[in-house]
Structures are given as C-alpha cells and as structure tokens.
C-alpha cells in the first residue's frame, strides 16, 4: 500500500487508513520506506525477519505522514517507534522484538497465527 507524499492527509485520515489496513491484512509492517526499499536499518531488519517465515505481508510506508502515523499507531500499540508489526490486528513489536522472537525460534509461530 502506498500513499502519495503530496497528499494532505490529516490525523483522522491516517487513523482510518491504519484501521483499514489492519482489518484487511493478516500481517502488516508499518515501516519507513517499503518492502523493496526500506529507508532505515530497523525497517530493513524487520522486513528480513518476517520474510524468512512468510511470503505475503503488507507494508505501509509511514514517511509521508510520520508524526500522524506515530500518533495513530501509538493508540494501538502504546509505542511510538517505527517499525511496528501486527499479526491479525494485534501488535507484535518492532524489529528488536522480532529479533528476540527469532532467536527463541518463536517468530515463525507468531506469524503463523495469522
């Protein structure tokens, strides 16, 4: 899913988009950049970790409206940092949590619950 950087999205638009993408996709990664071109190391790490276990997952580039996405996502997760991974609408964590789950051989199980 891509959003036009020139769009004039307000907070309520972003909140609706977050709700929609969480409701319509089993696995969602809110990240800086996109799956093919992550724009930060943490987002790149999250994409790599998820990709080890699943082929299909949605990514949302938060850069076009970063402050609005941070606020909207914090409502769901209690975290304002990016990236954020959700499975079946439930917050799993950022790249650090994904890495910990992978080290414990639990990431595949978490992602399989989708």
Image (cartoon, grey):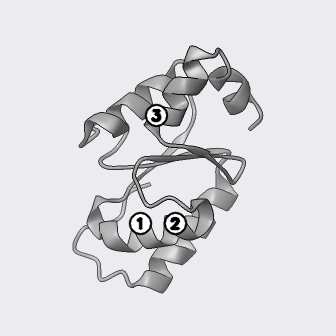
Left or right of residue 39: residue 53? right
For the residue pair 97 and 43, the one nearer the viewer reads as 97
Who's the residue at 55% across and 43% down the image?
93
Confirm or deny contact between disc 1 and disc 3 (CB under 8 A): no
Who's the residue at 53% across and 75% down the image?
15
Badge 3 is on which residue? 96
- SS assignment at label 1: helix
Left or right of residue 36: residue 13? right
Residue 89, horizontal then vertical, whole percent? 69, 54
C-alpha gap between disc 3 and disc 2: 17 Å
Q: Is residue 9 above or below residue 54?
A: below
Badge 2 is on which residue? 74
- SS assignment at label 2: helix
Q: Determine which quarter of the picture holds residue 40.
A: top left
Residue occupying the far right of the picture = 113
Q: Is residue 2 above or below residue 72?
A: above
Confirm or deny contact between disc 3 and disc 2 (CB under 8 A): no
Label 3, residues with CA under 10 Å away: few <14, some 14-19, many ≥20: few
Badge 1 is on which residue? 70
Confirm or deny contact between disc 1 and disc 2 (CB under 8 A): yes
């Amino acid at each position: 899913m891509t959003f036009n950087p020139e769009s004039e999205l307000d907070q309520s638009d972003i909140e609706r988009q977050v709700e929609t993408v969480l409701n319509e996709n089993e696995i969602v990664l809110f990240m800086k950049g996109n799956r093919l071109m992550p724009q930060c190391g943490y987002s790149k790490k999250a994409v790599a970790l998820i990709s080890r276990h699943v082929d299909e997952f949605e990514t949302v580039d938060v850069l076009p409206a970063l402050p609005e996405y941070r606020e909207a996502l914090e409502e769901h997760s209690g975290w304002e940092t990016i990236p954020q991974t959700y499975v079946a609408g439930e917050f799993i964590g950022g790249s650090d949590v994904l890495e910990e789950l992978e080290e414990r051989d639990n990431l595949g199980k978490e992602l399989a619950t989708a």
